[in-house]
Image (cartoon, grey):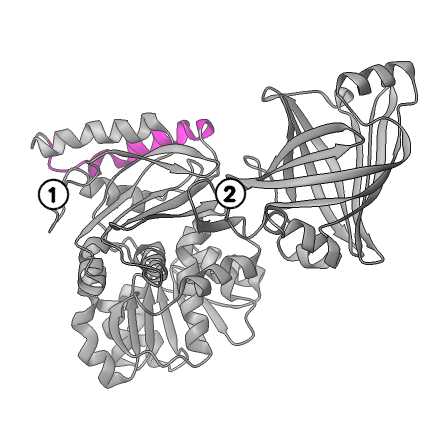
Amino acid sequence: MRVLVLGGTGVFGSRLCRLLATDPGIALTIAARDRAAVDALARELGVEGRAFDWRRHLDRVLGEGAHDLVVHIAGPFQGQDYAAAELCIRHGVHYVDLADDSVFVRGIDRLAEAALKANVLVCSGASTVPAITGAVVEEALKTGPVERVAFGIMPGNDAPRGPALVAAILGGVGRPIAEQPGRHVWSDLRRMRLPGLGRRWVAACDLPEPVLFAQRFGIRDTYAGAGMELSILHVGLWSLTWLVRGRLLRSLAPAAPLLARIADRLRFLGTDRGGLRMELHAESQDRVWCLIAEGGDGPFVPVTPAAALVRKLVRGASFRGAMPCLGLLTLAEIEAEWRQAGLRIAAGWGEGGVDLRPSLYRRALGPAYDRQSRAGQALHDAGPSHWQGRCAVAGAETAAGRFLAWLFQLPTATEDAAVAVEFETSGGGEVWTRRIGGRAMQSRQFIGVRKPPGWIVERFGVLDFDLEVRVAEQRLALTMCGMRCCGLPLPRKLWPAIEASESEQEGRFRFDVQVGLPLVGRLVRYRGWLTDR
């Protein structure tokens, strides 16, 4: 299928193109106005690129008959008309967009008759809203009724903020939300919790779900919100809404450049970690579904439904007509996109993040995860579990080393000792409790803030160790790359020497860990095997 992406070099467009570029069933063309940006991205991804203004030249481009599907990401969609969709219908080309504006998404069905006559799909909102939120509700309805829904989209403070997007958001702040009496944009403050990220503010937004969920699912009470990671920015914007609600200002849009600069100056106070929380209520039960995105992969979340829908059309899905993106994708199909791309995104049901999937190491390693041994994959994908086996322990080499090993309760030397490792999952991370010869060591592993792909952080008390995880010849190795105490970085000369590897022998998971210190020498080395049986 020949796919044309409008706005393909932007924050979201470029990420969608990265997801689609390697699919052998897709001939991708990146389109935007900036010739240099188009050529650079097209060259990087090995696809076609075209520079043109879609409002002026899309009719001519589609008239060439070189495209089967257009993905429209040249937002914002607030106040935008359906010109691109109408041109696609005229030329018999499928149309998909990533709009989140309530009026735009809900109004797309006015093109239904024309789309059916042209035998094409016209779909709006193939994004976080309403595609992901709707898929979560449909999944929940399989196990019981849903009477009320509340959700909050909470990106990390590092998330890119284009000037057009900032202006569009500020243009609606303080205005009444249609069909939601008493609610205004960025009013109705609430606090929502994300596993491993803590509690964040959210405020009401003019999103399509309240009306669409009532029409499709009969859910009459939906709170649709979004929030900023930094309280000072979120509550500060909420305060400014009273200028609009009190009719002292018509709009905050003119202040967009100033407010964007302030937000950029405070970027360092936040993180690259965000997510989505959905609360689904009924008389019989309450359920929570959470998504967390780390390592700066949050901007991929809105484009994964569009990628999934494009692939579904490529593989022969017969959707036709014009509609919001509800009922076209399952939650599993959307989740498959970030698993396939190796993104540091996890989701699951439950309050504390116990059931978030994919596993920590699978997210950290991405595609390299499958190159480790089968025993290693079984251990790291096992979730909460108990493993046991045997190991040999070599103790410290010096008196100072023996004292430090005793101080930190490291295992004592022995040729053969029972070893047990308990794994608990929480907040997107894992707690490892190792018991060797009567000594216990506990640590927490997680994806840290602003870490490159392939890194994890292991925390022992007040000490954090940055570890690069590599896989070669089915062997997983961890290399020390940084250290902090109480969050403060320590100089390299104070770092311990850590050598750790995982492999498989005779079908068993095997480990080899050695820890030492400069001038002190080895503190401990323990190596052996584990099994879950």
Predominant SS of the magenta segment:
helix
Specify the amino acid type for callout 1.
Answer: Pro
Q: Secondary structure at mark 2?
A: loop
Q: Earlier in the sequence, mark 1 or mark 2?
A: 1
* Residue depicted at 53% across the width and 68% down the height: 47
Q: Which mark is residue 294?
A: 2
Q: Is residue 228 left or right of residue 491?
A: left
Q: Secondary structure at mark 1?
A: loop
Q: Is residue 34 visible?
A: no
Measuring from the top left, give residue 97's x and y in whole percent.
32, 63
Residue stretch rendered in magenta on the structure: 249-269
Tell me which corner region of the image, top left, top right, bottom left or bottom right, holds residue 229. Answer: top left
Q: Is residue 318 visible?
A: yes
Q: Between residue 28 and residue 435, name the one nearer to us.
A: 435
Where 314 sits versus 258, above or below?
below
Q: Is residue 479 left or right of residue 336?
A: right
Q: Callout 2 environment at 10 Å: few (<14), some (14 to 19), or many (20+)?
A: many
Can residue 369 be found in the magenta stretch?
no
Measuring from the top left, give residue 70's x and y in whole percent.
36, 71
* Residue depicted at 46% across the width and 51% down the height: 348
Tell me which corner region of the image, top left, top right, bottom left or bottom right, holds residue 126. Answer: bottom left
* Residue depicted at 26% across the width and 51% down the height: 282
Q: Is residue 295 left or right of residue 477?
A: left
Q: Between residue 5 and residue 62, name the one nearer to us.
A: 5
Q: Please name the residue that numbered disc 1 is placed on.
A: 176
Q: Which mark is residue 163?
A: none
Whether tag 1 and tag 2 are in contact, CB under 8 A, the answer is no
Q: Callout 1 environment at 10 Å: few (<14), some (14 to 19), or many (20+)?
A: some
